[in-house]
Each structure stands twice: as C-alpha cells, then as structure tokens.
Amino acid sequence: NKYTLGMIGLGTMGRNLLLNMADNGFQVTGYDKDPKMLKKLEEDGKAHNLKGFESLEEFIQSLELPRRIMLLVPAGKIVDSVIAELIPLLGKGDMIIDSGNSHFTDTSRRAIELSEKGIHFFGMGISGGEEGARFGPSMMPGGDKAAYNAVKPILEAVSAKVNGDPCVAYIGPGASGHFVKMVHNGIEYSMMQVLAETYDILKNGLGYNNDQIYSLFEKWNNGRLKSFLLEVTRDIFKVKDEKTGNFLLDMIKDQAKSKGTGKWTSQVSMDLQLPIPTINESVSARDLSKFKSLRVALSKALPHQSVAIKDTAEFEAHLEQALYFAMITSYAQGLHLLEQASVEFKYELNLKEISQIWRGGCIIRAELLEDIYQAYKKQPQLPHLYTDESIQHQLKEIIPGTRNIVITAIANGIAIPCYASALAYYDALRTDKSPLNLTQAQRDFFGAHTFERIDEEGIFHADWN
Ligand code: 6PG
C-alpha cells in the first residue's frame, strides 16, 4: 500500500499540515533529514500511525504514482537544493508542490525548469500559521492545473471552511499562487502596523494601560473590526511574562524583523507603478524600528512637548472608525495591485474567488472580507474597492472620524505613517484635479520632458524662459 502524498520538511508547518491530512483520512507520509523531526511526527501522529522517512529514496519509493510531493522548507536556496536532489529520483508525471513563501520569480523559473523534465510543479501559498496548518489554512495554489486537480480533494478537505466553502481555489497560471500569497502578506504587514499605531495612540496619547487596551480591543472585536489579527492583538495584552511577572509585551524589544514578503510586495508595486503607499509604510516602519540607538539619541535631542489627548468616548469611536478605514484601505491597495499584476503577468486572477478564500484560515481573515467578497461578487471587474457602493457608504461614515485621529496624532507627535498615508491615499484618489500638472511643467522646464495639454491632443514642449 503506497502513500497518496509525501511531505518534505517536517517543521511545524509541514508536520501540522500532514497531521491535518491524516485527520481527514488521507494516507500520507513525510521526509526530513533531521531524525528529531521524524520522532516528533510519530509522537504527534500516533493516533494515525503516521510515519516518516529518513531516506529520500525510500520516501520516494513509498509514494503512489504519479507522485504527489509537497515541500514545506524555508524559501530560497533550500527549495532549489531539495528539487535538485529530487529530480534524479522522480519520473514523468510526478508533481512537486512548493508550499513555502517562495518569491514568485523563483516559482516561475522552477516551473519552467521542471516542465522541461516532465515534472509538474506548482507554487502554493499557505496562510494561517501553525494553527491554520493543523486545523484549516487558507491556500493559494497556482500554476500547473493538472497537478492542482490531482491534489484538489486533499487541499479542499484540509482547508478552512466558511459557510461550507473551502478556503482554497485554483488561483491561476504561472506563479500566481505565490504572488497572491505575497500580496496577502503585504496586507498583513499593513494591518499589523496600523494596529501598532493604534496601540501607540492608546498608550502614549491617551495613557491607557494594557488592561484598558485589552478591553477596548475586545469591544471592537465584537463589531465590524472582527478579525484574526485584532483577536490575537487583543490577547497579547493579557499575557504575563513568567520571568518577571510584568506584561510580556512590555519586555519585548521595539525592533521588528521580517522575512521579506512585505518588502517584495512593495518592490513589485514599484515595478508595476501601482501605488500601495500604506503597505510600503508598514515595511518602512519595521525597518525604521531597527535604528534603536539613533532613535534613543534623537528622542533626547529633539523631544516633543507632548500634549495628552483628551480621552473621550468620541475619540475612541473615531479611533475605531480610523482603524476600520485603514483596514479597508490595506485590502484596497493589495487588491488593486493584484488587478494590475493579473494584466501584467497574465495571471487571470479572480478577485471574487481570492477574497472568498481569504475569509477563513488565513492571517488577514476578517469580517470585512465578507463585504469585499460581496463587492466583487456583484461586480467582478470592480476597478478599485473604493468604487463599490456599499464600501463608499461606509467610507463616508468613517472619514470624518479618521481625519480627527490623524490630525490629533500628528499634533501630538505620535508617528502614524500607515494611518496618515491611508488618508492621503484616499484623498489623492478622490481628487479630480491633482497638482501633478506642476510636476509635468517642472519636468518640461528643466529637462524638456514634454507634456500633454487639456485642450488639445499631442505632445508639447514650451520655452519656459
Ligand atoms: C501566514 C503568514 C506567514 C508568516 C510570514 C510573514 O500567512 O501564515 O503570513 O506566512 O507570518 O512569514 O512573516 P514575517 O513577518 O517574518 O515577514
């Protein structure tokens, strides 16, 4: 009896996904170089008699033909070296599914290299962290459709479900799966930074303690802001440090790390000239946080006379509105980028389906995604999320409060790059006459770069002197 699928990489994600598959009745196995990982798989998978292999050859021989092999190894060179080890052991028609956070250009290259050898390859983004992998992630597979169909029943069974719908769908050709997962992470970075800015306003502007912040997030999470990220953020404000008895959050260094997916999203957006300023700011905020000693020095040299913000019920209500606005805008920018990438890279993306599979399992799952899904369901070719009528209705309600938050935070010297950029993005997008005619005039003035006129077709150049 051979196995239906084999997992390479039995770290937390690979192991949990394998356990999830076994729970769903699939005959699966795994391979890892590290015997400790194999032992852990056996321990956790006792109920299903789950076993892995330490020999790659034996692992490959144990799989049913054509072989379904999933990789959950760190993105980058390791993926290439695993594939190189696999190639001599595989036959035509076998398939490799790379489920890590690989860069989409790597996925395109690997798909071409492997198809020349008759091996099916597709890249799949998985979101949901450890819990998601174990009990239901959101999955974004793209590339070789035949290969996808060969694992579709497994993926649908293990994925998260929303109203009975699986949170997995074929995304499109090429590296579209990894591309969509990358943009998912860009949105994730943006929402995380907006929550950090909210924390800053509450802590340093209003003087709230951690218990008060917990209560407020708890209240908000019972309304339209309900989301996985707000939920985990809320829960962080409850956890105590075993070592000191203080809140664990207060013992953590204020310098954020990243593994690159947010940065990649910003890089691509620049290449495609499709602005996602709020996502960009969230990437920059993490990078800026690393300059701790510079920040400490400047906080002494350039102190701000902080004016405490008056804590009123109205301010709290406005902050809830601003957070909701920033969430809408984070999705709007990410989805707009997907729209453009779909044209540019011929990904044939279906934003209705993408927002549908993001409703459950993934890190950016939120109540709001139901509205977004409905917007794309009503109008699959929606040019921008802001153009949906029901979103517009909500925007009109939350913009005045958002302005108050941005103005107040700025007046009090609190850095709110994501909030401020989201509002500026909104204002720039709803401006019929931008001031960029001046930019064109300047370019033509000093560099004869020419301009177009509002009253006549053609390309013009003026003698500005
Ligand atoms: C997910 C997450 C997951 C991870 C990323 C981002 O969807 O499950 O996005 O992929 O959190 O690796 O991590 P960094 O913050 O380290 O870039």
Image: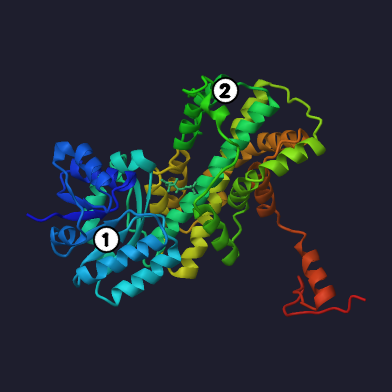
Tell whether 459 sits left or right of 361.
right
The amino acid pointed to by label 1 is Tyr
Residue toward you, 170 or 224 = 170
**Quadrant for the C terminus in the image:** bottom right
Q: How many marks?
A: 2
Could you tell me which secondary element the residue under label 1 belongs to?
helix
Task: Measuring from the top left, give residue 277's x and y in whole percent.
Answer: 63, 53
Could you tell me which secondary element the residue under label 2 belongs to?
helix
Residue depicted at x 30% and y 48%: 14
> What separation in Å lies between label 2 and label 1 (alpha carbons)?
46 Å
Task: Measuring from the top left, give residue 396's x and y in whole percent.
Answer: 63, 40
* Category of crowding for the residue at label 2, using alpha-carbon neighbours closer than 10 angstroms: few (below 14), some (14–19), many (at least 20): many
Q: Is residue 97 visible?
A: yes
Quarter-of-image position of residue 71: bottom left
Residue toward you, 387 or 440 = 440
Residue depicted at x 16% and y 48%: 26
